[in-house]
Amino acid sequence: MDNILEVEHLKMYYCGKAETVRAVDDVTFHVVRGETFGIVGESGCGKSTVCKSLVKMMPPPGRIVDGSVRYNGRELTTLSEGQMRAVRGGEIGMIFQDPMTALNPVMRIKDQIYESLRRQKLSKKEMYARGVELLRLVDIPEPEKRMEEYVHQFSGGMRQRVMIAITLAANPKLLIADEPTTALDVTIQDQIIRLIGRLKEELGMSVIIITHDLGVVNEMCDRVVVMYAGHIVEQAETRELFDHPMHPYTRGLIRSLPRAEGREKLEPIPGAPPNLAAEIPGCPFADRCARCTPACREALPPLREVRPGHLSACVRDDLEVSV
């Protein structure tokens, strides 16, 4: 397979004076060129931290303590900050959850687009034409008029489209979208999902979607990993994962989804993710798992193949896979 991204045994810790938080702990996966890859899990499970680690944007005192991140065969963990900025602003693009934190409220939209275009050494006229083209590409009406406006004059969905346009200015080959629809209403969420899918096909990008929303995963992703407490607990093709979820945590996530055919009551997973600053000798999901055995608490279960191409980190082989 032609992989655009390869992550091996990645560990990203927040190393404070009093404690060490193991936010990402021995994570391995790859992204195939041209695919949409999903990373899913509850808040606090490490999925957004993985996203920041890939492009070395961890806030202090976070640091990569071990592992490898290779983009197109190039090791990223050893690059200087200057070299990494060129990768972030060029070959790897990022869309964040809240565009208001990424967009500048005192700059016109065109000036923010120009910031992403400057390294292409275009004339002012060429930058303006490219900016209009980008806004049109993300389906913003009257792009010439909107180029002159400010962020507060845009709705939430339009701000996200502007953020996508700015990200696309550098023609990235890999797009990382961190909870791109969370702050939007359901109708606008669907529009943004369809927009990212269309742009991926038109521009030939690979996409990583980080989300807690299994509906987004089901609609967009070719393959998916499920994260819990800084670890990958399951990995499979999307259809396989939904049809045959193998890890108790994955099954819990799927059972907690509302369904059109109508379960009267949702089935939430009891409890909360563990403290990642504490030592967890066994499975980190053990305290919340109804089928926990003494063996589950003895050692961290390895991620192993339980069906062709389907990996799960659970010591139990006798669990029903139906949901």
Image (spheres, grey):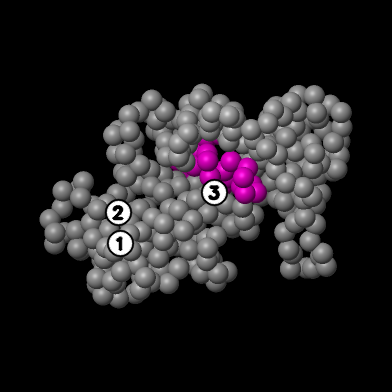
Residue 239 screen position, x and y as percent: 66, 50
Q: Secondary structure at mark 2?
A: loop
- The earlier-in-sequence mark between 3 and 2 is 2
* Residue 231 shows up from this direction: no
Q: Nearer the viewer, residue 104 or 314?
A: 104
C-alpha distance separating marks 2 and 1: 7 Å
Local crowd at mark 2 within 10 Å, few (<14), some, or many (≥20)? many
Residue 227: image quadrant is top right
Looking at the rendered structure, which numbered label has been put on residue 169? 2
Q: Amino acid at mark 2?
A: Ala
Residue 69 screen position, x and y as percent: 46, 30
Residue 223 screen position, x and y as percent: 59, 44
C-alpha distance separating marks 3 and 1: 24 Å
Q: Nearer the viewer, residue 311 or 185?
A: 185
The residue beneath circle 3 is: 210
Q: Which residues are magenta?
A: 27-51
- The earlier-in-sequence mark between 2 and 1 is 1
Q: Amino acid at mark 3?
A: Ile
In magenta segment, residue 36: yes
